Image (cartoon, rainbow, N blue to C red):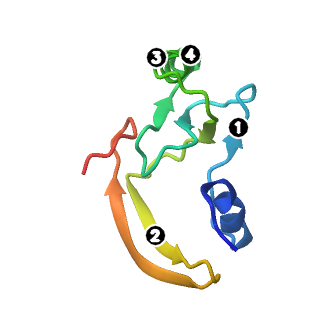
Amino acid sequence: MSCTRNNSRARYADINVPLPRQFGEDAISYPCIVKVSMSSDGMGNRLVKNEGDLFATLRQIRDVCNWKGEIVFQEFVPGDKEVPSFQFYLHKSGELFWVGASAGRVDGIFEWTS
């Protein structure tokens, strides 16, 4: 069984890992994090604080960057400055191997600082 980016949220929920809520574009509460479905390690994530920020961010993503894929709207969890990353290798046989862990730091606009 493989674990892809699309089904990893469900797998985390299966083992009771707390996750930020996700919103539909028509049901956003502020502040929230906006990211494209292919963002990685915090890169490309934007903190939007109000409708004006949201409009500008979506314009940048859709019109300037010509992004046609999914956009994710996620609950902002205040206070998180260090983001852990856990690496595993899932062999095609289904065996899961622990590779290691690392942590990245984010600043107030969710860009990697180191």
Question: What residue is pinned by disc 2?
Answer: 86
Figure check: 44 above or below 14: above
The amino acid marked with disc number 1 is: Phe
- Residue 32 image offset from top left, x and y in percent: 57, 35
Question: What residue is pinned by disc 3?
Answer: 64
User: Is residue 10 left or right of 66 when viewed as pictured?
Assistant: right
- Do the numbered discs 2 and 4 sit on residues whose CB atoms are within 8 Å? no
Question: What residue is pinned by disc 4?
Answer: 55
Q: Viewer-proximal residue, 4 or 15?
A: 4
Q: Earlier in the sequence, mark 4 or mark 3?
A: 4
- Residue 53 image offset from top left, x and y in percent: 51, 19
The amino acid marked with disc number 4 is: Phe
- Residue 73 image offset from top left, x and y in percent: 62, 36
Residue for point 68% across, 43% down: 22
Q: Nearer the viewer, mark 3 or mark 2?
A: 3
- Do the numbered discs 2 and 1 sit on residues whose CB atoms are within 8 Å? no
Q: Earlier in the sequence, mark 2 or mark 4?
A: 4
Instruction: Quote the CA–CA distance across marks 4 and 3.
Output: 13 Å
Numbered tag placed on residue 23 in the rendering: 1
Mark 2 surroundings: few (<14), some (14-19) or many (≥20) residues within 10 A: few
- Residue 78 image offset from top left, x and y in percent: 49, 46
The amino acid marked with disc number 2 is: Phe
Residue for point 73% across, 33% down: 24
Q: Earlier in the sequence, mark 2 or mark 1?
A: 1
| Residue extending furthest toward the left | 114
Figure check: 12 above or below 22: below
Q: Nearer the viewer, mark 4 or mark 3?
A: 3
